[in-house]
Amino acid sequence: MRAASLGLALLLGACATAPAARAPLAPVSPALQATTWTYGAAEAALIAETSFRAMVDRAESRLGALYFGSGFESAIVRDVADGRARMRECDLTFHRPAVVFDLDETLVWNMGAQADQAARNAPFDPARWARWEAEGGDRLVAVPGAVEAVQALRALGITPVFNSNRAVASAGATAQALARLGFGEAVHGETLWLHGDADGSSRKHGRRVAIAERFCVLAQVGDQMGDFVDAIDFAEDGSRRAAAERTRVARTAFGRLWGERWFLIPNPMYGRWNEPPLGLDDVVPQEARWTPKE
């Protein structure tokens, strides 16, 4: 009887000290996860800083080649023939050396607008973004390494040119925000190009052509393929490329440019890479799938 009582006591004691079952973790939205990684991860900051430092090094090296060489290829694409990019040529007699930058999520983080969207778990709202452009200039944050890179270029005599899809209506606010953050002067129509400038399009090709007519572009910096060339996102007939084809074109036709004349800043929060949203079937082939045996 005493043994049975002792066994019961031990059983009750074990039950009393056993940890309570944990509630399942709530799912985290992809938008929130991308936002917290971009703004909070040391890895994200270090990738950005590394890209900016590499860009300045390559721009300085190419500047020397531009001064002492004969004939020079710009970082702006002229056309694509036989699956290979051909670049525009430039000459210091007619062109000043420059580096072309995208703005949003390349030089500046829109933390306020992105946090608002992630907290609401809502799709992009153009009207809400327009309000952010008009009101949020004093809340923009420089991407790690960006200000130092632009200042280093200016010290070398290289002009930073900003090519953004921000609205022309916000040109003054955008220029003020850039100056406040330490990027220096930006003049609309000269060193600041915005949505619709040059050809009325949201795509940046027309603006790149206009910039290439004034500057010898040593490098381009952006967070989206469209910051560099249209041909990665869109086929010749104007149709949008599928994800796999987009990747293939980026690596084959333009592979020699990445890390040499084109420099990417990480942005997993939004972009044409996820329009329409990708799923597992889009990115993980069946032959790579795995499920553990029970």
Image (tube, grey):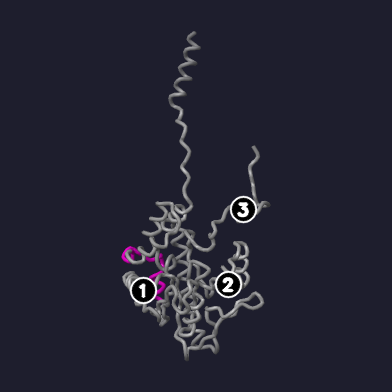
Q: Amino acid at mark 3?
A: Asp
Residue under the point 50% across and 81% down: 209
In front here: 119 or 13?
119
Q: Amino acid at mark 1?
A: Ala
Q: Is residue 9 above or below residue 207?
A: above
Q: Position of residue 109 (x, y in %)?
A: 40, 63
| The C terminus - image quarter | top right
- Label 3 or label 2, whichever comes before in sequence order: 2
Q: Position of residue 201 (x, y in %)?
A: 48, 74
Q: Tags 3 and 2 in contact by the CB under 8 Å rule?
A: no
Left or right: residue 150 versus residue 73 is left
- Label 2 or label 1, whichever comes before in sequence order: 1
Residue 267: give its label: none
- Label 3 or label 1, whichever comes before in sequence order: 1
Q: Tags 3 and 1 in contact by the CB under 8 Å rule?
A: no
Left or right: residue 92 versus residue 178 is right
Q: CA distance from mark 3 to mark 2?
A: 25 Å
Q: Position of residue 210 (x, y in %)?
A: 47, 82
Q: Position of residue 29 (x, y in %)?
A: 47, 50
Q: Quadrant of residue 169?
A: bottom left
Which residue bears the numbered disc 3?
281
Q: Which residues are magenta?
A: 136-152
Instruction: Tell me, yes or no, whether the highlighted magenta stretch contains residue 195.
Output: no
Furthest residue to the top?
A: 1
Q: Is residue 243 above or below residue 87?
A: above
Q: Amino acid at mark 2?
A: Ala
Q: CA distance from mark 3 to mark 1?
A: 41 Å
Residue 231: give its label: 2
Which residue bears the numbered disc 1?
171
Q: CA distance from mark 2 to mark 1?
A: 27 Å
Circle 2 SS class: loop
Q: Classify 10 Å Cα crowding around label 1: few (below 14), some (14-19), many (20 and above).
A: many
